[in-house]
């Protein structure tokens, strides 16, 4: 878990890699708002490439990749898919593809405290889309889809106890509709221009891959 904290500190951004811990004062990015390492306090952020144009673009790209829990090749594949969208700017199309991932939907709706937990639950077959089991975290949802947990997982005492509390206090994006009683998520529309938790400069991400 310390690796996740170091990643957030190195990128200088809350990426919610450790769930609700990132919301309070215990968040590593709050307690130690400087890069990890012996000389972290005196070190300029930016990682490889430093403060150069390339370094800034790389940092924003890393925020997206790490925040969504993607491998480099997968993020690059999403970028090329976004390029084929002729109706929207590439940045908006890229955000749309990332936000429509099933693991991200569970996180954004408050059904899990992190995307990594969401990936685990989906991968083990604990999530239904339109009453059918889906075990691919990268599954892309569409408008009108209904997402829910399988009844068996709702029998888990810890999840059953925490979920209602989380759903009542969560403020989901306006393209999601949460039914607290039924514990379902409905996709109302595609999430173009949706607010991102990690708040990357998506234009710089596009520039990075357009080099």
Image: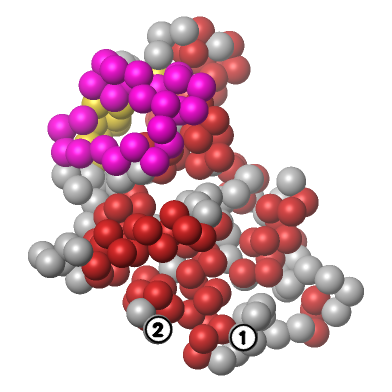
Q: Is residue 144 rendered magenta in the image?
A: yes
Count of numbered marks = 2
Magenta highlight on residue 72: no
Q: Which residue is mark 1?
A: 49
Please, which colouring scheme is shown?
secondary structure
Tell me which residue sits at (45%, 20%) in the image: 125
Compared to residue 67, the image places residue 58 above or below, namely below
Could you tell me how far apart the alpha carbons at marks 1 and 2 are, in whole angstroms? 15 Å
Q: Position of residue 164 (x, y in %)?
A: 45, 22
Earlier in the chain: of badge 1 and badge 2, it is 1
Question: Which element carries disc 1, helix, strand or loop?
Answer: loop
Report the magenta stretch's main SS: loop
The answer to whether 140 appears left or right of 44 in the picture is left
Q: Is residue 210 positioned above or below 115 on the image? A: below
In the current view of this chain or complex, which residue is farthest to the right? 38
SS label for mark 2? loop
Name the residue at 62% across, 85% down: 49
Q: Nearer the viewer, residue 55 or 149?
A: 55
For the question of whether residue 169 can be seen, the reply is: no
Relative placement, left or right, of 144 versus 201 is left
| Percent of width and height locating residue 114 | 54, 41
Res 211 label:
2
Residue drawn at 22 percent across, 57 percent down: 192
Query: In this picture, which residue range is highlighted in magenta?
Result: 122-145
Most extreme residue toward the bottom is 52
Residue 145 to residue 84: above or below? above
What is the quadrant of residue 110 in the picture?
top left
Callout 1 touching callout 2 (CB < 8 Å): no
Residue under the point 62% across and 69% down: 11
């Amino acid at each position: 878990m310390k690796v996740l904290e170091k990643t957030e500190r190195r990128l200088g951004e809350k990426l919610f890699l450790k769930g609700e811990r990132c919301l309070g004062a215990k968040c590593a990015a709050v307690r130690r708002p400087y890069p990890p390492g012996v000389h972290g306090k005196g070190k300029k952020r930016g990682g490889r490439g430093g403060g150069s144009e390339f370094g800034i673009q790389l940092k924003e790209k890393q925020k997206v990749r790490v925040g969504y829990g993607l491998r480099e090749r997968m993020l690059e594949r999403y970028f090329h898919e976004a390029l084929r969208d002729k109706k929207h700017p590439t940045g908006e199309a890229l955000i749309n593809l990332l936000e429509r991932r099933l693991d991200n939907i569970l996180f954004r709706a408050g059904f899990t405290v992190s995307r990594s937990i969401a990936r685990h639950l989906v991968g083990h077959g604990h999530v239904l889309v339109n009453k059918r089991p889906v075990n691919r975290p990268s599954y892309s949802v569409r408008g009108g889809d209904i997402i829910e947990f399988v009844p068996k997982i709702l029998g888990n005492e810890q999840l059953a106890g925490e979920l209602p509390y989380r759903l009542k206090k969560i403020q989901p994006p306006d393209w999601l509709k949460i039914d607290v009683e039924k514990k379902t998520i409905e996709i109302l529309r595609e999430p173009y221009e949706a607010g991102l938790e990690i708040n990357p400069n998506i234009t710089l991400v596009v520039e990075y891959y357009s080099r």
